[in-house]
Amino acid sequence: MDGHMNRRELIRLLSVAGLGTLIASSVRADAPAAVADSPGFMGRLIDPTGGPRAPAGIVGGKVIQPERQLPIMHQTDVLVVGGGTAGVMAAVAAKRAGVNVAIVERYGYFGGLWTGGMVLLVIGTHVKENGEKKKVVCGLGDELLERLTKYDGAIINQKPGAHNPTVDPEATKFMMDEMVREAGVNVFFHCWGADAVMDSKTIRGIVFESKAGRQAILAKVVIDTTGDGDIFAAAGAEYEQRTYAIGTVHRLGNMDRTDKEKAKEAGAKLPPLGAATPLPSVRWVNTRGPKANGLDIAELSRLEMEHRRNIWNQAQQMRKTPGYEGAFLVDTAPQLGVRITRVLQGVYKLTYKESREAKKFPDTVAVGGAEGAQHAGWPIPYGVLVPKEIDNLLTAGRCISADEKLLDDTRLIAACMTTGHAAGAAAAVAVQSNCRPRDIEIPRLQKLLKEQGAYLG
Ligand SMILES: Cc1cc2nc3c(=O)[nH]c(=O)nc-3n(C[C@H](O)[C@H](O)[C@H](O)COP(=O)(O)OP(=O)(O)OC[C@H]3O[C@@H](n4cnc5c(N)ncnc54)[C@H](O)[C@@H]3O)c2cc1C
């Protein structure tokens, strides 16, 4: 074996280690023989979930929610809200640095737009330095990508000399679970961060909604990695809000069995072919869509349905093209492709000009990549993660403080990995130094980041 394992080899290995039966027995296909009157078909009766309710009422024509005490579900050192790329990096970085960490995610899996949005291509992993290609996603992000190379069908273009790998979304969800679990982060899926718990200008935790009702989690430092700045907005931080192109990524199957020549001979227009994925027969199709407000639920609902209809119709059309009769639509991404909404106004706002001049900063905590590894890396200062006024709050990912032109670079998955890593490490340093994140010793943060493998230039 050359270090790479296919799925069958992996299962054989796990069986030898005695873990095969565990896996086989914890999830198994539904048994068709199960019938309502067979013993054990139903679960047992349990107490109703959730504490006493205080429903809203109508008072003088207004909807009023009565004042009520919220259960504190959990208390921690660092609370990460949003389990996308940036959130997972932040949570693992903080926990590995030795503080207690919890992560809250509205869906049932990690990865956000990367996995649920099926944006599979990690752009910006490398830059050009002294005429050579140089990797800037090191540390946790690179560890995740490297770990995917051990599995068959999990990643392409992560080999030495390559850049911008493409991942399989299921493999990536699995690997994020593994890294979070191994680190010992407390995970709360199916929880929607709804409000900030404030003590004047200092955040003390969040209020979240779940099937169990409205509850709170308290923390010494909160990291907003919702991508949309839901928590920094609720906390009263300064931000800009933008419209941006909203698309729906989808995947096409049987694409290795198409016949371009047959289509050309028939004079047919070639359908959109999408880009390669680690699964040979599957290609992913990125779409832009109209510029819209990604926080407007009526607009989001309209776009979900309109995009799905267009994609369905295109797929049907594709199947009528000679040579493409066997191709099919595998799936549309479960998460709509919202690229940019709220953008923090941090203590520092990084500009596109500064990035292209590769301006150096004393508080550099990450280095941004180049789309095609064609230009130099751009140092990212800590100040872009820190709100101007609100304390004990950091952000990372696609909503960090940058000017309009740079947002197309700061939102790339590679940059979300490195800014997430930086925010998690910074939160840990703040907790361990017993100070506000804005007051931490930058050399101490940079030392920790380097110990965790990060590249700071
Ligand atoms: C259509 C499209 C194509 C793109 N193409 C590329 C590409 O080819 N290559 C590339 O590198 N980048 C691409 N990008 C950009 C990139 O995918 C994203 O910017 C990046 O994945 C964002 O990561 P994030 O962690 O900052 O945010 P997100 O991935 O948005 O993660 C935020 C997480 O927080 C959760 N969340 C949100 N609100 C709450 C809440 N209130 N409470 C609890 N949880 C919450 C979400 O469910 C999600 O898991 C593309 C983006 C889109 C939309």
Image (cartoon, rainbow, N blue to C red):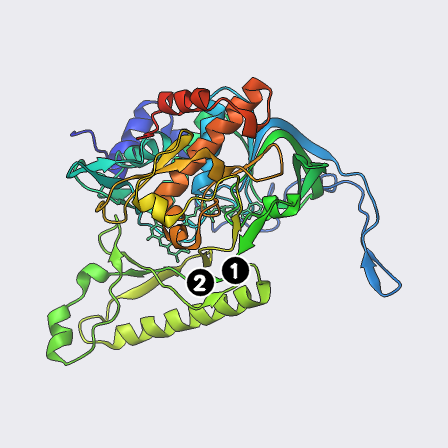
Separation (CA) of disc 1 from disc 2: 7 Å
Location of residue 69 in the rendering, given as x and y in whole percent from the top left corner: 80, 38
Q: Earlier in the sequence, mark 1 or mark 2?
A: 2
Report whether residue 234 is seen. Answer: yes
Q: Are marks 1 and 2 in contact (CB under 8 Å)?
A: yes
> Could you tell me residue 59's position as x and y percent?
88, 60
**Between 274 and 125, which is closer to the camera in this rendering?**
125
Q: Is residue 308 above or below residue 209?
A: below
State the residue at coordinates (31%, 49%). Answer: 121
Q: Residues within 10 Å of mark 1 (few under 14, many from 20)?
A: many
- CB of mark 1 near ligand 1 (< 8 Å): no
Given the image, on which type of amino acid does mark 2 rest?
Answer: Ile
Give left or right: position of 277 versus 349: left
Q: Which residue is mark 1?
A: 294
SS type, badge 2: strand
Label 1 residue SS: loop
109 left or right of 230? Answer: left
Q: Position of residue 26 (x, y in %)?
A: 46, 35
Residue closest to the eye, 409 or 67: 409
Please give the residue where the numbered disc 2 appears in the rendered image: 246
| Occupied quadrant, residue 210 | top right
Which of the 4 image quadrants contains residue 195? top right
